[in-house]
Image (tube, rainbow, N blue to C red):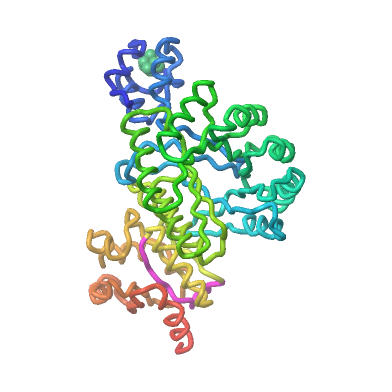
Amino acid sequence: MALSGVEIFKHLPKTNCKKCGHPTCLAFAMKLAAKQATLDACPDASEEAKAFLGAASEPPIKGITIGAGDKALKVGEETVLFRHEKKFVNPCGFALLIKDTDADVEAKAKAVADSEIERVGQRLRVELIAVENASGDAGKFADAVKKAVSAAPNAGVILKSSNKAALEAALPALSGRKPLIDGATADNADEMVALAKASGASLVVRALGLDALLALTEKITAGGFKDIVLDSGARKPKDMIEQYTQIRRASLKKGFKPLGFPIISFAVNSNPFVEQAQAAVAIAKYASIVVLSDISSWKTLGLIALRQNLYTDPQVPMQVSQNVYKVGDAKENAPLLVTTNFSLTYFIVLGEVENSKVPSWLAVMETEGLSVLTAWAAGKFTAAKIAQYIQESGVESKISHKELIIPGYVAVLSGALEDKLPGWKITVGPREANALPAFLKNKTAAA
Ligand code: SF4
């Protein structure tokens, strides 16, 4: 359960020595309560305080890392039920399910390796491979894992088998890679925990329904093993929402430790549309790993965008720096466009200008990360401010003309802008960015 700043303060040294970087112990306690600081910043904290506050300040949902190095995936550590309360912390990971009976193990793993795309300035990808021991044969399983790892060396690996011999055969290929073993059930929990401990892996704990899952996690954590990912057996959206929400609520609102672990969700379905819909449900409520049978781009692009949108901090507008950006080999006669510095606006406009193949100058104006219409409504993208920005940006030294293309949504500003920028021609561009390629091509053809 979350502690208040005053409760935390009672356990601090109360010397106000400032070594933690805060003016008083109370100020530091408030930061600890808000989870904006950690106790190790206070070098004088007593062992009693560390034990008490350490347990209390542990994230209600444990963080689990799969994979190694800078491509490792960390999931869990969420602190809120709803994104707008604060933010979602560690984006869920996507895993492609590959069976050791598949003829194209390497090709599927390669698709994972090649899945990275750029969206709104971020590199996004499918992070995990889940290799399933569908054959029941230990040698085949180990062979498939080796092939998958070799084709996708940066992917984290989930070993989907409850066969001890098959796991023992596959694990040596994953030394130092922190795999996730899937998994432990009531029947094999002891030997799976032993295997996970010995190999440095984390472990999926699976039981049908929350009561059975709870009994199993209590048993496993009582033995000291806590690198756990939960599978409640939910495979339909209704069950996913119901069970995952109960798990999240119990861990966050009740501080219920036996369910304070990330969730793995199997969205896999023979109908690709159902699979995508189930995956979307799992991303939103509240899976930390979503397993898919197919990562064709028509399917994953939407899921990747959904995940990115949900895991963006809602209190921090995504923005790019104010600047006049050169697109392509823009020369002095290239068109000049102006827009706002909301990241999504910038990247969409930039993408469409690039699609046009017309080298251009893109003047991106600081509007505190607001989109065009919002910035205009908020008085941050007005004729006076745009004119001041253009005059102070230095763009006039880069171009040989005085024509500024403004977004169609603020066509109303064109007259006032011509007044504020004497000698300039203001051209109203399209309202939607996807009309920019045709607009720019027509413009250069007419020039
Ligand atoms: S370092 Fe510790 S004792 Fe010193 S002000 Fe910070 S919390 Fe108080």
User: Residue 26, how many percent across, how many down?
Assistant: 30, 19
Q: Quadrant of the N terminus?
A: top left
Q: Quadrant of residue 167?
A: top right
Q: Nearer the viewer, residue 31 or 23?
A: 31
Q: Is residue 291 above or below residue 335?
A: above
Q: Is residue 102 above or below residue 187?
A: below
Residue sitting at the far bottom = 446
Residue 339 counted in the magenta span: yes
Q: Is residue 435 above or below residue 284?
A: below
Q: Residue at x 34, y 48 (%)?
A: 314
Q: Quadrant of residue 192?
A: top right
Q: Residue at x 33, y 30 (%)?
A: 34
Q: Nearer the viewer, residue 165 or 427?
A: 165
Q: Which residues are magenta?
A: 329-340
Ligand 1 image position (quadrant): top left
Q: Nearer the viewer, residue 300 or 398?
A: 300
Residue sitting at the far front = 187
Q: How many marks?
A: 0
Any part of residue 321 in sight: no
Q: Residue at x 22, y 62 (%)?
A: 377
Q: Is residue 342 above or below residue 68?
A: below
Q: Residue at x 45, y 10 (%)?
A: 47
User: Residue 372, how many percent across, how many down?
Assistant: 31, 65
